[in-house]
Image (cartoon, grey):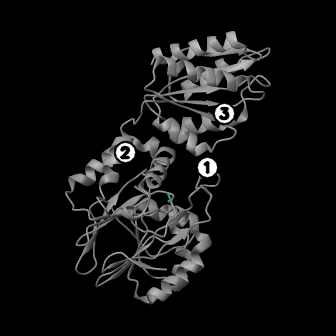
Amino acid sequence: MAKKITDKVTWVGKIDWELKEFHGNEYSTNKGSSYNSYLIRDKKTVLIDTVWQPYDKEFVSRLKQEIDLKEIDYIIANHGEIDHSGALPELLREIPNTPVYCTAKGAQILKAHYHEDWNFVTVKTGDTLDIGENKLIFVEAPMLHWPDSMFTYMTGENILFSNDAFGQHFATESLYNDLVDNSELYAEAIKYYANILTPFSALVIKKIHEVLGFNLPVDLICPSHGIIWKENPTQIVEQYLKWADNYQENQITIIYDTMWNATRKMAEAIAEGILEADKSVTVKLFNSSKEDKNDIITEVFRSKAVLLGSPTVNNGYLHSLGGLIEMMKGLKFKKKSAAAFGSYGWSGEVVKQLTEEIEKCGFKVVDEGHRSLWVPDEAELSVCKEYGKEFISKL
Ligand code: FEO
């Protein structure tokens, strides 16, 4: 159902309560998501973004209930990824000559996805589109998070249509930030930042300062996923500046996998040692084979240090650690420290292997890690505890 946001702007997107995986299986969307599309009715009529392809027919048929499609003068494609462009083929079959405004990269990406020669109009930062009483100002935002990404600002209503930036995978019928549980909202917003935007943090800071430099008033930030920032809308901009600045809390995260609990016992003893040495630090433990990978990544994002643990199995570490290590390499966390631990029976090379991987993740290696032979007894658990104390003393 369409939802009126202002006299001139209506939300016409899709709330996807069922979505549990996004980007294939790369991102868990336990709280669903939404694909936000916005219809602007000024003297000209403009549609900003569409929805994911499985909902294309539903989207177009609901849009027809809201407006005669022939009245749409312009389509703005802020981003070519299919969760926002997926309904363009269905829509443009009905109104084929409608201009599609996007960046030059956006036109390339849309052509490469849909193999259609639509009426593309490419725009750059500072270009404007007169829509009657108001105008739209385009701001390129390359690599936030694709090369084609773009923001669109609407004057008069003072709305920033920020596409993926400032979004959250959070299905809710309540459209605005002041109508939802803010702890839930921020849990999804930080997960989204940690898992998607971390590698682009330097660009986030640069782009935010560039946009702030335009001195445009902002009454609403309308992202393409989740809620609209209405109450103190720039709070999320300020939060992004903090997250982008090598964010960390006084937290140490211990991530381990275990076959017969020896490495788990080590993890718990190390955690005990850390807390004995410093009661102010938050220590969290996760068995990587049992916890949501994206929630673990979010905890890594919040941490100043990380410990990775695995037993040695077939001369390597357990596979659940492998996936997380690949994710951490790609996300390029900065200014975090780490070390490895694990139990072993004979060859025992995993701690050395994990330490090498930690370095490839860009973490500062604190020390050479700690190994326990077979199942740790009380004496060995005391050694693990001491290792935890030493680890935190070296941070
Ligand atoms: Fe980059 Fe929501 O798509």
Where does the image place residue 87, in percent across and percent down from the top left? 54, 73
Any mark on residue 109, and which?
none
For image coordinates 77% across by 29% down, the residue present is: 259
Q: Is residue 139 above or below residue 318?
A: below
Q: Pick whichever of labels 1 and 2 is earlier in the sequence.
A: 1
Q: CA distance from mark 3 to mark 1?
A: 15 Å
Which residue carries the number 3 mark? 321
Q: Is residue 154 left or right of residue 294?
A: left
Per the model, the C-alpha gap separating discs 2 and 3 is 29 Å
Q: Secondary structure at mark 1?
A: loop
> Which sits earlier in the primary sequence, circle 2 or circle 3?
2
- Under mark 3, the amino acid is Leu
Q: Residue at x 62, y 11 (%)?
A: 383
- Residue highlighted by disc 2: 203
Q: Earlier in the sequence, mark 3 or mark 1?
A: 1
Q: Is residue 56 placed above or below 103 in the rendered structure?
A: below
The answer to whether residue 42 is seen in the rendering is yes
376 is higher (above) or lower (below) than 199? above
Q: Which residue is the site of mark 1?
A: 26
Percent x, y for residue 20? 62, 58
Q: Which x, y percent locates residue 50?
A: 49, 72
Looking at the picture, tell me which residue is in the foreground, 290 or 330: 290
- Is there CB contact under 8 Å for labels 1 and 2? no
From the top left corner, tell me how far across and down residue 163 is, in percent: 42, 61
Residue 365 seen in this snapshot = no
